[in-house]
Amino acid sequence: MTGILNSRIVLAQHPQGMPQLSDFTIEAAIPVAAPGPGEVIVEVDVLGIDAFIRTMLEDRKGYHGSVGIGDTVTALGVGRITHSAAEGFEPGDSVFGPLGAQTVARLPAAFLRKIDTSAVPATTYLGALGLTTGLTAYFGMHAVGAIKPGDTVVVSAAAGAVGSLAGQIARLEGAGQVIGIAGGPHKTAFLVDELKFDAAIDYKNDDVALRLSELAPNGVDVFFDNVGGAILDAVLMQIHEGARVVICGAISQYSDMSNVSGPSNYLKLAERHSKMEGFAVTHFAERFPEAELALTGWLKGGQLVVHEHVEHGIEQFPRALQMLFTGGHEGKLLLSVR
Ligand SMILES: NC(=O)c1ccc[n+]([C@@H]2O[C@H](COP(=O)([O-])OP(=O)(O)OC[C@H]3O[C@@H](n4cnc5c(N)ncnc54)[C@H](OP(=O)(O)O)[C@@H]3O)[C@@H](O)[C@H]2O)c1
């Protein structure tokens, strides 16, 4: 035993629809055993609250796998090694990896990546330089969206982690007009005032199709979609000839994955010689260094506005997960576990 105690969030039942607090329990003061060969103990600092976590809570195996009843809920995080039985990993090293919704993780070091926190805070490896955030925005916009100078670009869930970076990357890569779709006047103001998007549509109060036809009368060249459902349908009606519709995610559909609502306006793709292409960031694993170089350059040059929303306390994990669906945050949603 290490003398260290862990508190973890456990799945009590598979959520039906929006995750409820009763779908989770917290187990506290669990003694942590010494690391086995190749393992390390990590004191978790901050967790990323990511949409894929919800898809893993389903009572069936999803793309990212599934969390069983009684298991620690999956989450990516950053932390510091306290004990090591793995070559190349020392106590004090900062690491990123699948630490789980808990305060202390014991896991194979092979699952972890050592991170350099001398130039950027550790949370940057969850946000702007994070797999599920910065890298996702980069490959979705740069590789799949294939931005061309002067393009009119629309991003949904634009005030969130991926969306806020995707829109800025579009601008950095030469887009002519960047329009964000988000919920509520506070978020649309954030997009225009802080992130310097050209315009924003409040899908909770505006008629999205009407506003798009006003803002982009010549059509949309690239749609970076994080939401799916009715928003995807509304933008499909407004695509330009040769448009690229990037399926990054469909957060409006994750609470009922057995009944995903497909786009009824997909024939616009044929009419306007356009394509719709999905991707998972892991498909670009061999090109991660390229994305890290580009993102680091923009960060160093002060060209990316990075926003983090931090909740506190491991016991707040279920509420933080709910926030991802109710939209109470801007930028990257994080949970500081202490
Ligand atoms: N392809 C990949 O490899 C990959 C990797 C990572 C993430 N993703 C996807 O990227 C998307 C964004 O993830 P994120 O982590 O950056 O989350 P996020 O955008 O920070 O948070 C989700 C946002 O979605 C909006 N939203 C939630 N429910 C909605 C609904 N029913 N209709 C419209 N908007 C809704 C909320 O903003 P509002 O307040 O504006 O509603 C919320 O802030 C997700 O679809 C996720 O699955 C894909």
Image (cartoon, helix red, strand yellow):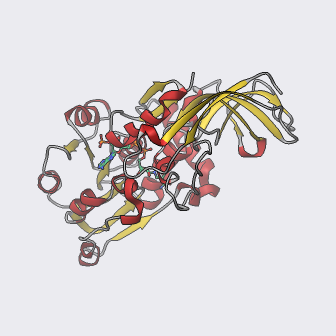
Task: Tell me which residue sits at (45%, 26%) in the image.
Answer: 311
- In the displayed structure, 74 sits above or below 61; it is above
Which of 60/165 is in front? Answer: 60
Q: Residue 244: where, in percent of width, then height?
A: 35, 64
Task: Tell me which residue sits at (48%, 37%) in the image.
Answer: 298
Q: Residue 238: where, in percent of width, then height?
A: 20, 63
- In the displayed structure, 87 sits above or below 265; it is above
Q: Residue 127: where, in percent of width, then height?
A: 50, 37
Q: Residue 158: where, in percent of width, then height?
A: 33, 44
**Residue 199 is drawn in which quadrant?**
top left
Q: How many marks?
A: 0
Task: Tell me which residue sits at (38%, 58%) in the image.
Answer: 256
- In the displayed structure, 322 sits above or below 148; it is above
Instruction: Identify the image quadrant of the C terminus.
Output: top right
Q: Residue furthest bottom?
A: 270
Instruction: Identify the image quadrant of the N terminus.
Output: top right
**Residue 277 is drawn in which quadrant?**
bottom left
Q: Is residue 289 left or right of residue 252?
A: right
Which of 4/110 is in front? Answer: 4
Which of 86/219 is in front? Answer: 86
Q: Is residue 250 visible?
A: no
- In the displayed structure, 220 sits above or below 109; it is below
Q: Is residue 40 visible?
A: yes
